[in-house]
Amino acid sequence: MAETKLWCKDSRANKERFNDEGYSTLTSDEQKRVEKSVGAIYNYFLNSESDSKEPILHRERHITYLKKGLKNLPEGFVSLDASRPWLVYWAVHALELLDVKLTNEEAAGIIGFLKHCQNPTGGFGGGPGQYSHLAPTYAAVNALAIIGTQEAYDAINREKLQEFLWEMHNDEGAFRMHEGGEVDIRGAYCAVSVARLTNVYTDQLFSGTAHWIMRCQSYEGGFSGTPGMEAHGGYTFCGLAALTLLHAHHLCHTPALLRWAVNRQMRFEGGFQGRTNKLVDGCYSFWQGGLFPILHTLLTQEDAVNISAEHWMFHQEALQEYLLLCCQHQRGGLIDKPGKGPDFYHTCYTLSGMSVAQHFSTPAIHKKCIVGHPSNELATVHPLFNIGVESAVSATQYFNNLPRLQLRQRSKTNDNINNEESQVQT
């Protein structure tokens, strides 16, 4: 077998280590420690006496980890009791990327649980009996779309969901995460994502939202959680994906965003950081990597630059090497960086980012870029919803064949209006 050409074997790699230019800080010291641990892993892999020089995705270990977690989570997850639909979504989506189909019993159990998380007034809470919240609503809708059965689709009360979204919408076009909750860009993304997926979208429901989102694009080019704050990978994904789902992507300053995004890939490690001068983290493989399929489409439409017809505008091979060599836990699950423990969150988003890096997909071409053994290939992820492409297509087709809902506006209480104003000012 011919030896696989690896980016980490390239002599340029060591030249990309961080140089503090003689001025050591806590941040620069931590960066050097991470590079040392990553470099040691790369060197061990390249110098091992194994017959295979191909990175391997330990698929069965990850499947076992995820399946076990769906049935019984360890005590360390008790702090996520208000995020139980998230735990379900992270596990179900990770299994979907690994080409694992849930059994009928598993699917029925998840559907039943999520139905208990749905409130009569609309939306899903973080667990049965908890207040409706846009974040677990997004997670629950995605999980049900991945299951993709009639029972799963019918579990979503679309009429009440639309009413809940309207209750969270404020006069500026932003969205509160829950009643009395914070206002930030996550709310806008979660709201428009579930609205498009379930066909409850109306222009009135999202009046002013695109222009509020644009107030969050910072001088750096990325997006912040609220206007005037620092650009961040997760918020940037939420901003760009929401603008695209709103068909308002033309408002985005794409050259500035592209410049910011490409500079978030770490030159030595190969993975992405979330913000300027921060450490590499496996989850940003999607939060940052997922920007590039969207940006590719926007820049192609703008015809502003020459766009490659074969690659995204980041180093796809380097990212996969970081994830395969540095982010797989030996007992299953994926991690942030070497030395960390596995969890469902990082397992989901590292695999989502790896899928983006493996598949260059446009309407005209689908080109694969699989680092290591061919069995490493994952299912293709939809970059706007972060569920499988097949799941997204099936769900949107099903719900788009249902009657479009007309927004029935419930009058918002004075307390809600006052709360919206104070949250936006904050």
Image (cartoon, helix red, strand yellow):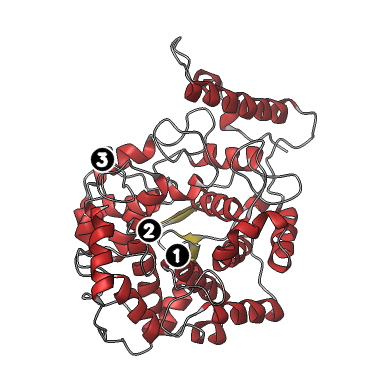
As displayed, is residue 324 above or below residue 115? above
Looking at the rendered structure, the secondary structure element under dot 3 is helix
Which residue is denoted by mark 1 in the rendering? 135
Residue that mark 3 sits on:
256
Question: Type of residue at label 2?
Answer: Arg
Does residue 199 appear in this view?
Answer: no
Distance between the alpha carbons at the discs numbered 3 and 1:
28 Å
Disc 3 marks a residue whose amino acid type is Ala
Q: Residue at the location (49% across, 52% down)?
A: 356
Q: Position of residue 215 (x, y in %)?
A: 21, 51
Q: Residue at x 46, y 71 (%)?
A: 137
Q: Is residue 76 above or below residue 319?
A: below
Question: What percent of the width, then of the height, locates residue 14?
Answer: 55, 20
Q: Is residue 227 above or below residue 365?
A: above
Q: Quadrant of residue 407?
A: bottom left
Query: Which residue does the numbered mark 2 point to in the structure image?
Result: 186
Amino acid type at image mark 1: Ala
Q: Is residue 19 above or below residue 163?
A: above
Tag 2 and tag 1, C-beta contact below 8 Å:
yes
Disc 1 residue crowd, few under 14, some 14–19, many 20+, Cα 10 Å: many
For the residue carrying disc 2, how many other residues have a C-alpha within 10 Å: few (<14), some (14-19), or many (20+)? many
Q: Earlier in the sequence, mark 3 or mark 1?
A: 1
Residue nearer the viewer, 226 or 361: 226
Residue at x 68%, y 51% (from the top left corner): 333
Q: Earlier in the sequence, mark 3 or mark 2?
A: 2
Q: How far is disc 2 from disc 1 in space, using C-alphas?
A: 8 Å
Q: Disc 3 vs disc 1: which is toward the camera?
A: 1
Residue placed farthest to the bottom in the image? 403
